[in-house]
């Protein structure tokens, strides 16, 4: 089967590419530049130049493909021009789905995010049925992903087979940029995390997320949301696991949320407001941290046969990979 993966040079996308190759499929990867796919060097993939905002390039990229996995996303918690996030995530998703439909692609899997899922109060985990609306989305990234998810659902409601997955926080090897969670791991390993805040994440092995994409199109229902997650952990618990795996001491100081918010506000005022530079502590990220990003993946487990594996082993693979690639000083 000929398959296109957008965002194939990213963290989740590169693992999905490896999974598809292991199943014997021909894989084509859409990329803005050759540098964005260096993590795929040595793999038998076809890289085609294109952009989600360039419709002709999308028509050429999907030509002859039976399935498309749309993993690409503009993930930034700060941008000099926030409209770019909507053009890439919302308009780009519509452009790609339209091209797939026009070229007769049989099935599309859209990689959404738990960022587009509601979070109930009281530290309870959210699921696919938690009430949520656009006003609940903090910041332009979450708003753009929420709107892009609605675009994918609209295509599904009109009869086009678009399958939607909502990964939580993947961890593991080959997180080369790295992601926000990868930065936490790297900073911890380099001794640059003296303190933490009271927040929480749902961690899942990145290999499981890649497999969840395949399970969604094989066993799922178009337009239905499927959370791909595993273990809900506080940031303190995550750092303690990292400490055990790396034999490094965990940070002991927990900073009050109000203090972190005040520091971020001042830093954003100077960096983003006065210097027009990306802040080191994005205010949107601090606002998100006020709620624990905890989720339940029961639907994916029951309907797709999604069976998440050990988070501890995934973190161990991440640590080993960062050491091997020179991220740890």
Image: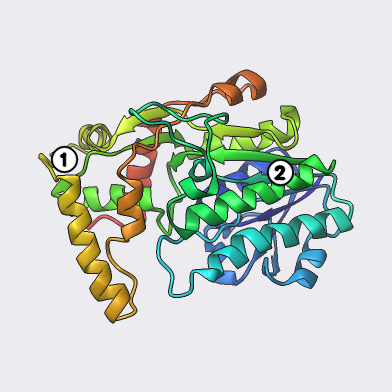
Residue at position x 22%, y 35% in the image: 236
Query: Which quarter of the figure is the C terminus placed in?
Result: bottom left
Is 275 in front, or is 192? 275
The furthest residue to the left:
253
| 152 lies left or right of 174 | right
The furthest residue to the bottom:
275
Circle number at residue 278: none
Query: Which quarter of the figure is the N terminus placed in?
Result: top right
Is 149 in front, or is 191? 149
Does 259 sit above or below residue 52?
Answer: above
Which image quadrant is residue 109 in?
top right
How busy is the neighbourhood of tag 2: few (under 14 within 10 Å), some, or many (20 plus)?
Answer: many
Residue 27 position within the rendered picture, expressed as x and y whole percent measured from the top left: 72, 52
Residue 29 position within the rendered picture, expressed as x and y whole percent measured from the top left: 68, 59
Circle number at residue 248: 1
**Residue 58 in view here:** yes
Which image quadrant is residue 261 in?
bottom left
Q: Secondary structure at mark 1?
A: loop
| 14 lies left or right of 107 | left
Q: Which residue is mark 2?
A: 153
Residue 302 position within the rendered picture, expressed as x and y whole percent measured from the top left: 61, 18
Which image quadrant is residue 237 in?
top left
Residue at position x 44%, y 35% in the image: 119
Does 306 sit above or below residue 137?
Answer: above
Is 170 in front, or is 201? 201
| 328 lies left or right of 255 | right
Image depth: mark 1 or mark 2 in front: 2
């Amino acid at each position: 089967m000929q398959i296109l993966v957008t965002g194939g040079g990213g963290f989740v996308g590169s693992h999905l590419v490896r999974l598809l190759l292991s199943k014997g499929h021909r894989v084509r990867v859409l990329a803005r530049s050759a540098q964005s796919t260096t993590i795929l060097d040595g793999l038998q993939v076809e890289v085609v130049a294109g952009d989600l905002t360039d419709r002709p390039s999308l028509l050429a990229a999907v030509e002859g493909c039976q399935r498309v996995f749309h993993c690409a996303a503009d993930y930034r918690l700060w941008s000099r021009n926030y409209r770019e996030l909507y053009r890439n995530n919302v308009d780009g998703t519509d452009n790609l789905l339209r091209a797939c439909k026009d070229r007769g692609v049989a099935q599309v899997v859209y990689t959404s995010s738990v960022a587009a899922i509601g979070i109930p109060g009281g530290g309870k985990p959210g699921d696919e049925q938690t009430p949520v609306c656009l006003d609940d989305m903090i910041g332009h990234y979450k708003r753009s992903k929420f709107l892009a998810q609605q675009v994918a659902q609209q295509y599904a409601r009109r009869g086009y087979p678009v399958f939607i997955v909502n990964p939580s926080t993947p961890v593991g090897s080959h997180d080369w940029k790295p992601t926000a969670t990868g930065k936490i791991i790297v900073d911890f390993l380099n001794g640059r995390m003296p303190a933490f805040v009271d927040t929480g994440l749902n961690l899942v092995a990145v290999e499981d997320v890649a497999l969840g994409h395949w399970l969604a199109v094989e066993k799922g229902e178009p337009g239905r949301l499927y959370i791909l997650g595993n273990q809900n952990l506080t940031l303190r618990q995550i750092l303690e696991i990292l400490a055990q795996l790396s034999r490094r001491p965990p940070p002991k100081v927990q900073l009050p949320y109000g203090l972190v918010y005040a520091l971020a506000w001042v830093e954003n005022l100077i960096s983003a407001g006065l210097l027009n530079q990306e802040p080191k502590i994005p205010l949107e990220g601090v606002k998100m941290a006020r709620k624990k990003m905890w989720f339940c993946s029961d639907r994916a487990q029951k309907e797709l046969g999604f069976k998440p594996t050990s988070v501890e082993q995934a973190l161990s693979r991440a640590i080993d990979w960062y050491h091997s690639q020179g991220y740890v000083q």
